Amino acid sequence: MSASGYGGAGHQGPPNGDGPYGGWPGNPPAPPVPPVPPQGHGHPYPPPYPRPYAPVPPHGHPHPPLPPARSSRAGRLARLVYNPLYAAQRAFRPSRPGIVEDRTVRRLQLWRSLLGATAWLALTLTYSAVTSAQDAGKVAGDRLDQSWTSALVLACTFPVVVAAFVFAARGGARRVYLRRALRPLGAILALMASMATFPLAMAPETQGIRDAVGLPGKIVMGVLCLWSLGFAVYGIGLSLVHVFRTADVHELLAPVLATTLVWEMAVLDLATGAYSRIPPGVRLVFVLGAPVTVTALSCWEVYRLRHHHGMSVRRALRP
């Protein structure tokens, strides 16, 4: 009896066939079957697998920003040597870590200095006979001498005010203020040392020293004198604006010392008869206008330090 029904011998697949229809003539070949991944692999393609997306960090860039490049210590030292203006900035600008920087007050201090210089120039050109380059040089020299006198008065006033401030402090604040006072003291010594190079290079009393060192020594003295000129001129301006970086000791010392300095200079101008060519009324307004303006600005600076930064004299002396 022959087999019948599905699954019997009469209904088996065609011989040498690849599928239910691939073995019969005229049928298309069966599509290739993709390889089955090994057990536990879970993906039909070998690694590495492409990521669908890369998470974007909060700063909005797929890669973290590079840290800013820091100049080496040798590079900074080289810049101090060949750039006297950079050296003056490092010597006369406050740089204590954690110092309060009020940009509004700093801009007003800069404008105060510029307006003061403009007013002095206007009065000088109005009431002085400047008719030649020699007269203009004399006027500029007088202004430089006055600025140098101001710096000297400030250098003499600084130890008194800082000593009183440190002596009034209590507890560990006294030691902290004494340690911080080294930077302003170093600024004063740097300015004095730079000014001492001019007599060494030009004074008749030091002619014997210049003859002893010969031509190479004279060249070195000349280069040093030119470097010191830029350092001293720019340093005097920075010293008057930043009050010999007394903010490195405490932020409240700068307005107090600036007010003391301008009133001392006003009394000195009145006592020595400065600006003698200016009419008495204009001279009085000009001499007293600077201390009144600086006093008002200093009071406003103290107000901002107290109400915006929580600083007061009581907290500074008794932390």
Image: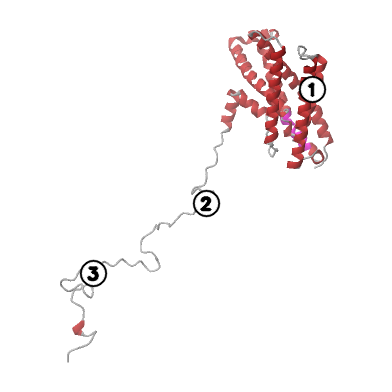
Image disc number at residue 30: 3
Residue at the disc numbered 1: 288
Residue 128 in view here: yes
Q: Position of residue 197 (x, y in %)?
A: 67, 16
- The mark nearer the N terminus, 2 or 1, is 2
User: Which residue shows up at 77% across the image and 40% down it?
Assistant: 306
**Dot 2 amino acid type:** Pro
Q: Secondary structure at mark 3?
A: loop
CA gap, disc 1 and disc 3: 107 Å
- Colour scheme shown: secondary structure
User: Which residue shows up at 69% across the image and 31% down it?
Assistant: 108
User: Which residue shows up at 69% across the image and 39% down it?
Assistant: 98
In this view, the residue in front, 316 or 40, is 316
Q: Secondary structure at mark 2?
A: loop
CA gap, disc 3 and disc 2: 49 Å
Q: Position of residue 157 (x, y in %)?
A: 79, 25
Quadrant in which residue 286 is drawn: top right
Q: Residues within 10 Å of mark 1 (few under 14, many from 20)?
A: some
- Of marks 1 and 3, the one in the foreground: 1
Q: Secondary structure at mark 1?
A: helix
- Of marks 2 and 1, the one in the foreground: 1
Q: Is residue 76 left or right of residue 168?
A: left
- The mark nearer the N terminus, 3 or 2, is 3
Image disc number at residue 57: 2
Q: Residues within 10 Å of mark 3 (few under 14, many from 20)?
A: few
| Part of the protein shown in magenta | 175-184
97 up-or-down from 192: above or below: below
Magenta region, mostly helix, strand or loop?
helix
